[in-house]
Amino acid sequence: MVRKNSEHLQHNIKAFIRKGEDYYVAECLDIAVVMQGKTLDETIANLKESVALHL
């Protein structure tokens, strides 16, 4: 049996979240990703998905 040594790389990406009139807007400071959502939880979930797709 052969085992692969898999290492998980982890990098912190900073984002600024602000509340607009109708939506929260999240903008990454390190990469070109901007996302929005109706709630803070939705905005964070959308941001995580967008960053993963970007990378």
Image (cartoon, rainbow, N blue to C red):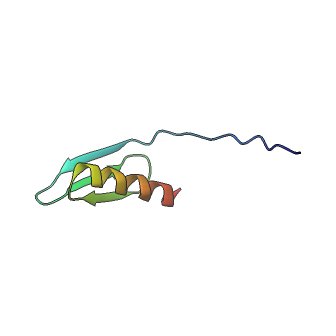
- What percent of the width, then of the height, locates residue 33? 39, 57
Residue 21: quadrant of the picture? bottom left
Residue 32 coordinates in the image, percent (x, y): 41, 56
Residue 8 x %, y % = 63, 41
Q: Is residue 11 above or below residue 26?
A: above
Residue 6 sits in quarter: top right
Q: How many marks?
A: 0
Q: Residue furthest left?
A: 21
Nearer to me, 33 or 51 = 51
In the rendered image, the quadrant that contains the N terminus is top right
Would you say residue 26 is visible in this rendering?
no
The correct choice, above or below, for 10 with respect to 40 in the image is above
Seen at 38% across and 46% down, the residue is: 29
In front: 52, or 18?
A: 52
Q: Give whichever of 8, 11 is nearer the camera.
A: 8
Give the farthest residue toward the front: 1
Q: Residue at x 45, y 54 (%)?
A: 51
What residue sits 33% from the left and 50% below the top? 44
Viewed as shown, does residue 23 lie left or right of 42?
left
Question: Residue at the right extreme?
Answer: 1
Q: Is residue 54 left or right of residue 6?
A: left
